Amino acid sequence: MSAVAGAPRRRVRGFTLMELVVTLALLGVLAAMAAPLAELTVRRHREQALRQALLDIRAGLDRYKVATERGLIAQRVGDSGYPPSLAVLVDGVPNQRSAKGELLYFLRRLPRDPFAPPQLPAVQSWGLRSYQSPAQAPMAGNDVFDVYSRANGKALDGSNYAEW
């Protein structure tokens, strides 16, 4: 069919190029504003996970110490009463008061440091402090008195992760 002169034209529906460019520009601005917020949320989540992991491990260390003081765990003369490694908290130790030799467990699983490289096992992701080492210069030793994060960064509150 050919168009007849003077016949009304149909209006073409759609977006102009300018409308599409403006829309894409607005979406780009919104995405640029959302990216830092998403990074902040991820960082805050990792910091919260670090705090919880430190609380869980330290509670396990304290439960081990209490069990040692109550005579449930064999202790040699001169030992501090803290576990020799973090793995002991999960693997269990023999209960000295159990006739069947049942094991005492202090953690279901060892949480990993959320700031540690992902290829490191959970046991190796933490820095260890023995009972004999000072708080200012933590060093591993014959026991595990405390744990700390090996992350070098600063938290959102300005404190160092290693000082938590």
Image (cartoon, helix red, strand yellow):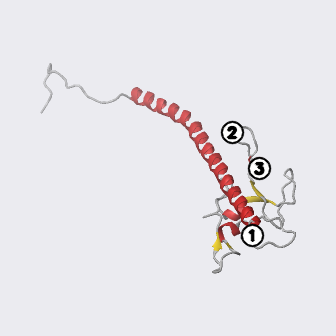
N-terminal label among 2 and 3:
2
- SS label for mark 1: loop
N-terminal label among 2 and 1:
1
Numbered circle sitting on residue 71:
1
| Nearer-the-camera pick, 118 or 57 | 57
CA–CA distance in space, label 2 to label 1 = 43 Å
Q: Are marks 3 and 1 in contact (CB under 8 Å)?
A: no
| Place of residue 109 in the rendered image (x, y in percent of width and height, measured from the top left) | 61, 64
Q: In this image, 13 relative to 83: left or right?
A: left
| Place of residue 114 in the rendered image (x, y in percent of width and height, measured from the top left) | 65, 53
Question: In the rendered structure, which amino acid carries the disc numbered 1?
Answer: Gly
In the picture as drawn, the residue positioned furthest to the bottom comes out as 100
> Nearer the observer, disc 2 or disc 1?
1
Q: Name the residue located 75 percent from the left edge and 69 percent from the top edge.
A: 71
| Nearer-the-camera pick, 49 or 12 | 49
Q: Name the residue located 20 percent from the left edge and 26 percent from the top edge.
A: 10
Quadrant assignment, res 74: bottom right
| Place of residue 67 in the rendered image (x, y in percent of width and height, measured from the top left) | 72, 65
**Residue that mark 2 sits on:** 156
The crowding category of the residue bearing disc 1, from other C-alpha atoms within 10 Å (few below 14, some 14 to 19, many at least 20), is few
Question: In the rendered structure, which amino acid carries the disc numbered 3?
Answer: Ala
CA–CA distance in space, label 2 to label 3 = 14 Å
- SS label for mark 2: loop
N-terminal label among 3 and 1:
1
- Camera sees residue 151: yes
| Nearer-the-camera pick, 2 or 39 | 39
Quadrant assignment, res 77: bottom right
**Residue that mark 3 sits on:** 162
